Image: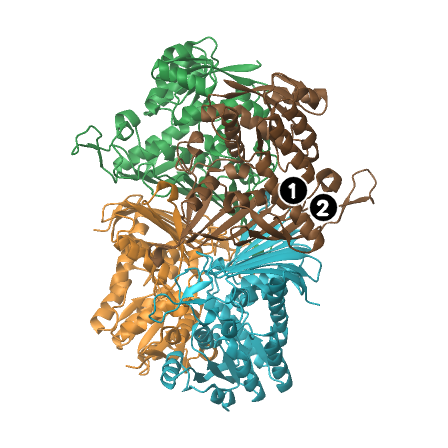
Chain colours: A green, B brown, C orange, D cyan
Amino acid sequence: MDSVGVGLIGTGYMGKCHAIAYSAVATVFGLSTRPRLELLCDLGAEQAAAAAAAFGFARSTDDWHKLVSDPAVDVVSITTPNGLHPAMAIEAARNGKHVYCEKPLALTLEKAEAMAAAVREAGVKSLVGYNYTKNPAVSHAKRLVEQGAIGRLLHFRGCFDEDYLADPALPHSWRMQKEKAGAGALADMASHLIHMAQHLCGPIGAVMADLTTMHAERPINDGSHAATGRVENDDTVSALVRFRAGFSGSLDSSRIAWGRKSRFAWELHGSAGMIAFDQERMNELQLYQAKGPKAEQGFKTILSGPAHPPYGNFVPAPGHSLGYNDIKTVEVAHLMRGLAGEETLYPNFTDALDTERVMHAMLRSAKEGQWVSLD
Amino acid sequence: MDSVGVGLIGTGYMGKCHAIAYSAVATVFGLSTRPRLELLCDLGAEQAAAAAAAFGFARSTDDWHKLVSDPAVDVVSITTPNGLHPAMAIEAARNGKHVYCEKPLALTLEKAEAMAAAVREAGVKSLVGYNYTKNPAVSHAKRLVEQGAIGRLLHFRGCFDEDYLADPALPHSWRMQKEKAGAGALADMASHLIHMAQHLCGPIGAVMADLTTMHAERPINDGSHAATGRVENDDTVSALVRFRAGFSGSLDSSRIAWGRKSRFAWELHGSAGMIAFDQERMNELQLYQAKGPKAEQGFKTILSGPAHPPYGNFVPAPGHSLGYNDIKTVEVAHLMRGLAGEETLYPNFTDALDTERVMHAMLRSAKEGQWVSLD
Amino acid sequence: MDSVGVGLIGTGYMGKCHAIAYSAVATVFGLSTRPRLELLCDLGAEQAAAAAAAFGFARSTDDWHKLVSDPAVDVVSITTPNGLHPAMAIEAARNGKHVYCEKPLALTLEKAEAMAAAVREAGVKSLVGYNYTKNPAVSHAKRLVEQGAIGRLLHFRGCFDEDYLADPALPHSWRMQKEKAGAGALADMASHLIHMAQHLCGPIGAVMADLTTMHAERPINDGSHAATGRVENDDTVSALVRFRAGFSGSLDSSRIAWGRKSRFAWELHGSAGMIAFDQERMNELQLYQAKGPKAEQGFKTILSGPAHPPYGNFVPAPGHSLGYNDIKTVEVAHLMRGLAGEETLYPNFTDALDTERVMHAMLRSAKEGQWVSLD
Amino acid sequence: MDSVGVGLIGTGYMGKCHAIAYSAVATVFGLSTRPRLELLCDLGAEQAAAAAAAFGFARSTDDWHKLVSDPAVDVVSITTPNGLHPAMAIEAARNGKHVYCEKPLALTLEKAEAMAAAVREAGVKSLVGYNYTKNPAVSHAKRLVEQGAIGRLLHFRGCFDEDYLADPALPHSWRMQKEKAGAGALADMASHLIHMAQHLCGPIGAVMADLTTMHAERPINDGSHAATGRVENDDTVSALVRFRAGFSGSLDSSRIAWGRKSRFAWELHGSAGMIAFDQERMNELQLYQAKGPKAEQGFKTILSGPAHPPYGNFVPAPGHSLGYNDIKTVEVAHLMRGLAGEETLYPNFTDALDTERVMHAMLRSAKEGQWVSLD
């Protein structure tokens, strides 16, 4: 096929992010298969029409059922709140649409499993938006590990901190309700961290987690001054993990970490070196190798460049920096090539179940106060 | 008008950069006036056709004269080697086309002046691609200066270093010939630095420059091993400057600075603080303010975010990083709005002459070994 | 008293460190009570005599019993392997000597308690060498917390990583034997981290730890090539902690972390800001305060200076950097003033028991795989 | 000789710095020849006596003539304002004393030359306090250059900025008077920078300098509110330089650079790599080498350690940080060994004349507005 008909559900943070990636991807990558922006769905017909105009989509609707059954749509981008993912993804799959869904898949493991089953049964392709692994710097880190650049893996350390709920005066919202949002920092950010740990270190065998809700009540914006709502999910999560490969790690995430804007930072400790990365400086990879004269050993700051594909598709000169949206463009290029049969989509819904399982094991561990095995 | 017909000449580094920006700009900014990718020109009909397909242009040509006279083209993007800018820009202007040209304008001041005269006489609009000033972090720096955040300006320090010619084994090319490329590091990078200094500190009144060519001979790739070609322009430029506002500065640039990939770094010294920036960490602004308790004074690392417009058009969350291409998208949004009459284009060809004048004054100063006044 | 007679046991890493601090402290601080370097004890009479000459001590001995009973000695510095601390400290105390002992106190909690009892019963003063809290930057961090600069504490994150045993080829030694060294990274480094967490955040109520030994066998240097010895203690420790004040933290430490030379890094997350510190840049304190315009918020890098006492005793100019030994000099100045009755020594042996208790609770937690309460 | 009798003139910033170094040096380095603190001279007999007590000197005087002729004094440390150096140094030399003098030597080149002549004629040894080159990280940088680690030198870039006079409200003082202080930032800081450039790159052949005085008037603290005094020397200096070896450099220094506390930062550009250093992070050396796979090239942050002598004399573990005073201790160890005939003192007064000549050439260049040759 020469082009892929795209249907996009949602026009918020991630909805616009998908739209930007679709608009730029063919030019950046010179794709043979280009996205064709067919149909956009948002709440309210007018808002949907406005967003379609702004994002360059041909048509709009306020009924997602129509979108997932539209004949011109080949792939459905789902960027709605997580609780809505399963129904949309499952119906899309049953209609024979490929599904590109934001993370995590669902609020419960059962629903996530149902999503994975639906795409398998329908024989459609799927992709989950764990975009951070698509950063050329991160891909290079993985390549370095595979090449033995830091020897045998011995330990993983990671955090993902932001401050989007750090202000205690921020109002209560659906994000703090278990029924609507599921977990808190664990779902929003630690899911990315878990996925990254699995991507770099392989399967996780057991977890021991501790969750806290430090801002337990938040004001309700209903004109009444005294009203507050209870925050039902986690502000912070800290976890010990054991990888199947026989080493340990620790993961931390907070949504109330003042000053951190996108501090998704991790370290790979190896028997011959270390790799470190911080998303706030997403174009820099830190590499220490225990070789050469001691007097010249040190962490190298490697700036992303054409030597780290597919950076060169964006800019031919090194050190010129990719941005957050560019990484989503890499992900969408992968989606296009996957749909064209040129690449195997990763992580698909089944792959992503591994991450969901760890998330839910952490929830259980924190509740029970003990190690939970993933076996 | 609802859309602007775009003609793009050149498909190299900056040509692709323009194309990516045109493809994403409407979605990112929700523009009322969208670019319409009409015609692309490159050397060779086949290559032009291939690039048009890859970049999403409707048609292609290998004759730039056709492009600058094409009725569907409203604005011409010129991304060819600098020596070719004047003829293209002048003919485009005479055909009533707006012109968006990469920097610097020309190899000689006379030609640059002719370009400025041509657009003025034709009554068309113009924009020069000094994109680095369009970075939200840089725009914020300028705003801070205007708000008096660091007091009265006292000094400017800047460098722009890369290593694209650092390897002495790199072959001789047209870039090293005065007739074809004009100056070296001075034209490629120091022009950006001069423009930035003027943008932040106002007009420059006098310059004292020193140029060196450290790799004076480079191998010629003609199969003959012994042949070398003479490098006729500058590998490094260092300059003292005096701003009209009564303070001094120093500017340095090198194209043979190993390890520097895009180190366009500068400092604004003020009577009440300092601002520092480094393009290699283009999402960070350093701000020191001499206020509050001494024990808590220090440089603040401000991560770009929605508080620094137009960052929020790209991502609603702070600290998620814009990339090099995103800044070009900001520039193209400015172009679109300028052509729609919503903003005044800056720097246009006349504005850019100030930078060309300083460049040529530096060349003369280096040759004569003395201060050259810009008065 | 005008001077304090010092007896030093041990001349290795920490022994020399004590000696340097004793030699400089009076000049740096203009002390009324100066150390008088009386007696030095090391293994072997000749080595002891040589060290005494090098370190400026008046006399030497190879019998520590003589040192702790010497009439000219007022305070005994103990810098031997940890297993030897208790006997020396207890005998010194019983002889009426004040005791300045390196950390941790002992291999078992019982012995540490016996040491604390001995100094209490003898009515002598004691100090434990948790020097990192004496860094002016760290003292300022504590002051900031107490002043409410970052609001209410919400979370603690810390690590202490080095690579002194990262090379798998390093030979087996007493340091890897439980009987002689006790714990591994937990005793060497995590003890500092636990103490820092307690110093900054108050008492710890419960811990959940995970220990690994990744290099389980190491070569034995006895001329036989094939022989290896089993490493009996921890290469890495990761722990979740709950502070009594109602918030959580996570602590990690590794002695096999390639590239880390003294990465004792921690973060204090508060309801109104964050403080971060890294010992590898021990003269920098990172402070984020959620106040002022959003566009100007960011982490401030505060360089140590005279505004952070007692930095000014070393250099009158800010940003000129203190070193590792300088912090020990701060500790010894505290010791001198404590012995002169001008300050209350902290942490004394009783204070330090809190840290030992957490260490041993972590050992038990790791063994049992469950949370251990400190109540 | 077993010990060296020390006489110290001055007890301010550098006076105390010398005293601390003398107190610690023998212990740190295990010197065979130890300093013996004989006599201290300060203004006022009481103040001198107090300082002698604080710094551990045996005797005191308020008459420097007595000090430079005292039979027990072997070496005289001169740490007074620069204008006083010549008389003291010359008289000391004539009395057969070795002289250890702070930098720069004098207010005029003639006086500096007279000092050099005096020590030569008297046959005594001399050392000038350009301490920054004694930092183990800097010594390693020089070693790397000599080993060809970055190839042939192509360019030098350096600055030395502080903010000790950045506040325009700071009162007028002798430091701003030409007659008493000579140059401003040029003498205080740029002298260090020039010396470092010469140390690393060899002789300077020509200079082109620009000086500014941005805070031209400062309040006089005499109770009268309206009075101000004229600042007669430079707040900032910027200079282009040509090294005899055939490459260029640029040097900048400011004493009004808010936020900079000890930013003595420089870069060595080579044909095969780059070395960069910043005194504010004085334990870190940045090294880029253009070798190995492009994807793994980057600046290495090398933390000072035992592999960089004489770091190991201070701490046996790498990355534990030396401080500003430690570098002075390295300098004093060199002095002690030089006096014992074990090393050749560098830079002695004659060596230091090279730096004075460049300083004065810069003053002349700035005055005349043209290049000044050092030939």
Res D293 → quadrant: top right
Residue placed under numbered mark 2 in the picture: B233
Q: Which amino acid type corresponds to the residue marked 1 in the rendered image?
A: Ala
The residue furthest bottom is: D71
SS at circle 2: loop
Residue A176 shown left or right of residue D199 in the figure:
left
- The answer to which quarter of the image holds residue A214 is top left
Could you give the CA–CA distance between mark 2 and mark 1, rounded to whole angstroms? 10 Å
Quarter of the image with the N terminus of chain A is: top right
* In the depicted structure, whether residue C96 falls above or below residue D233: below
In what element is the residue under mark 1? helix
Which mark, residue D56? none
Residue at the (27%, 31%) spot, across then down: A176
Pick the front one: D313 or D136: D136
Estimate the x, y position of residue D187 in percent, counting from the top left. 54, 68
Q: How many labels does the image show?
A: 2
Nearer to the camera, B124 or A249: B124
Residue B279 lies, with reference to residue C47, above or below; the image says above
**Left or right: B47, with C95 as reference point:** right
Residue in the picture at 48% in, 64% down:
D316
Q: Give the x, y percent position of residue D135.
A: 53, 65
Question: Badge 1 sits on which subunit?
Answer: B
Can residue D326 be seen by looking at this rendering?
yes
From the viewer's side, name the closer residue of C172 and B130. Answer: B130
Judge if badges 2 and 1 mark residues of a common chain: yes
Q: Residue A194, position in %: x, y?
A: 40, 35
Residue beneath label 1, please?
Answer: B187
Asked whether the beta carbons under mark 2 and mark 1 sit within 8 Å of each other, the answer is yes
Q: Residues within 10 Å of mark 2 (few under 14, many from 20)?
A: many
